[in-house]
Every structure is written in structure tokens, then in C-alpha cells.
Image: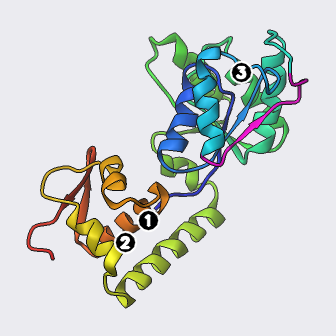
């Protein structure tokens, strides 16, 4: 079950872009706080990514004039917006001169939670994370390390899981679920293939897959889904 968190980042190369893409691929929402005007995506190679963010229901946000280009001072300035919009800031990689440390500092000043992923002591891009952990940031090894800091959110997720399980128990498979199940064999089938075969929105297919999995009819594996033997 998804936590339904909105991922906020800066549309930059590296972790920023990976964060946005991860949210989109999980059919979630993401906000890109830009260091340029809305008409000037930077880097230019992320124009397509910016379009996908909007198409998936996300937001492009900028405090600069629409035609403003990229200036070095824009990026640390916009970091306060990234942290301010968020209930917590997670730093995945950071050198000691990384702008991510600026975002983490803003988060602390704004009363937000700060998280950091540790790395090798020989990796310069982990030094900033280790610094934050020493300063009191929470060490993160898995998603639940973040979620457990927000107990109200955990309660909401558990309630959603129970609601889905109860719904599945009460209802037999309808025509759409049967059609989707028929599209899944004993070899791995990707979500993209299933969306094409059943001709339904991806967001709806993902929910239906969860319901089939809760009934024990299919199983999630690396790369997609497979049918469970002796299940009809």
C-alpha cells in the first residue's frame, strides 16, 4: 500500500530527477521547485521530465519571473521552499558543500523532520549525510524509517489496508478483474503490458492488481506480476 506522500524536489540532475521519476512511476504526485522561471527549465534535458510531472498531476513551482534563467544564487534560495512545503527532508547523498545541507538547515529552522541515508566512509558524497546524522538527523535505511516518525500517517495507511481487505472479501471478481487476471500468466507480466491489454488507466490497473494480490490470485515479483498456481 502506498503512503500517498507527495515528493518535493528541485528538478536538478541526480537524486532530484530520480525522486521525481520514482514518484511518477509509482503513480504518485511530485512537486518540482525550480531555480528558474517556469518558462526556462534547467537543465534543458529535463524538459520532458517537467512535462511528465504536470501530466501526472504534479506541480512545477517557481518564485522567479517566468522568463528568468538559471543563476547560481537561485538554487540555494529555492531550497527553503522545498523544505517548507514538506513535513520532512530526506538527504540521500551530499558532499560537505552540497546544497542539500542548505535544505536540511532550512528544514530544521522551519521545525521539519530531517532524515539522512548513510554511506561508505570513503565516499565523499556520503560525508554530508554523516554530518547530518551526527547533528541529530534520523538515520534512514528503509522507507518505514521515515514513515514511523509520522504515526498519524501510519494509522491512515493501516486503515486503508484494512478497508481494501474488507472490500475484497465482500466482493467477488467483476468482469474487469477477471479480464485483468486472464492477462496474467505464470511468466512475469509488466504493468505497462497489462495497461495495454486491458485498456484501462494505469492508476486503476494498479489498484485492481493490489486487490487481486490480496485475494491470493497473483504475486508481485521483480519486474511485474505472476499468476499463483492452482488459483482461478
- Which image quadrant is residue 97 in? top right
Q: Give the residues in magenta.
A: 56-66
Whole-percent x and y of residue 7?
63, 43
| Residue drawn where x is 57% and y is 24% of the image | 130
Disc 3 secondary structure class: loop
Left or right: residue 218 versus residue 150 is: left
Indicate yes or no whether the magenta region holds residue 212: no
Indicate yes or no whether the magenta region holds residue 59: yes
Whole-percent x and y of residue 134?
63, 28
Tag 1 residue: 207
Tag 2 residue: 211
- Which image quadrant is residue 51 in? top right
* 73 w.r.t. 109: above or below: above
Q: CA distance from mark 1 to mark 2?
A: 6 Å
Looking at this view, is 124 or 180 the one in front? 180
Q: Earlier in the sequence, mark 1 or mark 3?
A: 3
| Residue drawn where x is 30% and y is 49% of the image | 193
Structural crowding at the residue carrying mark 1, measured as other residues with C-alpha within 10 Å and reported as few (<14), some (14–19) or many (≥20): few
Tag 3 residue: 41
- Magenta stretch, main secondary structure, is loop
Amino acid at each position: 500500500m502506498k503512503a500517498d506522500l507527495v515528493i518535493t524536489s528541485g528538478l536538478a540532475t541526480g537524486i532530484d530527477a530520480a525522486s521525481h521519476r520514482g514518484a511518477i512511476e509509482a503513480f504518485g504526485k511530485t512537486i518540482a521547485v525550480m531555480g528558474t522561471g517556469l518558462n526556462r527549465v534547467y537543465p534543458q534535458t529535463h524538459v520532458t521530465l517537467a512535462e511528465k510531472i504536470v501530466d501526472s498531476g504534479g506541480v512545477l513551482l517557481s518564485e522567479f519571473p517566468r522568463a528568468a534563467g538559471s543563476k547560481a544564487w537561485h538554487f540555494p534560495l529555492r531550497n527553503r521552499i522545498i523544505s517548507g512545503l514538506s513535513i520532512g527532508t530526506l538527504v540521500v547523498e551530499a558532499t560537505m558543500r552540497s546544497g542539500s545541507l542548505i535544505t536540511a538547515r532550512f528544514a530544521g529552522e522551519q521545525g521539519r523532520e530531517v532524515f539522512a541515508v548513510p554511506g561508505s566512509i570513503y565516499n565523499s558524497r556520503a560525508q554530508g549525510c554523516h554530518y547530518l546524522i551526527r547533528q541529530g538527523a534520523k538515520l534512514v535505511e528503509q522507507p518505514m524509517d521515515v514513515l514511523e516518525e509520522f504515526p498519524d500517517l501510519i494509522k491512515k495507511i493501516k486503515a486503508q489496508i484494512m478497508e481494501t481487505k474488507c472490500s475484497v472479501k465482500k466482493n467477488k471478481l467483476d468482469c474487469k478483474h477477471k479480464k485483468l487476471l486472464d492477462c496474467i500468466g505464470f511468466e512475469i507480466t509488466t504493468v505497462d503490458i497489462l495497461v495495454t491489454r486491458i485498456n484501462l488507466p494505469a492508476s486503476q490497473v494498479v489498484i485492481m492488481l493490489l486487490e487481486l494480490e490480496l485475494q491470493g490470485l497473483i504475486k508481485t515479483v521483480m519486474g511485474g506480476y505472476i499468476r499463483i498456481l492452482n488459483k482461478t
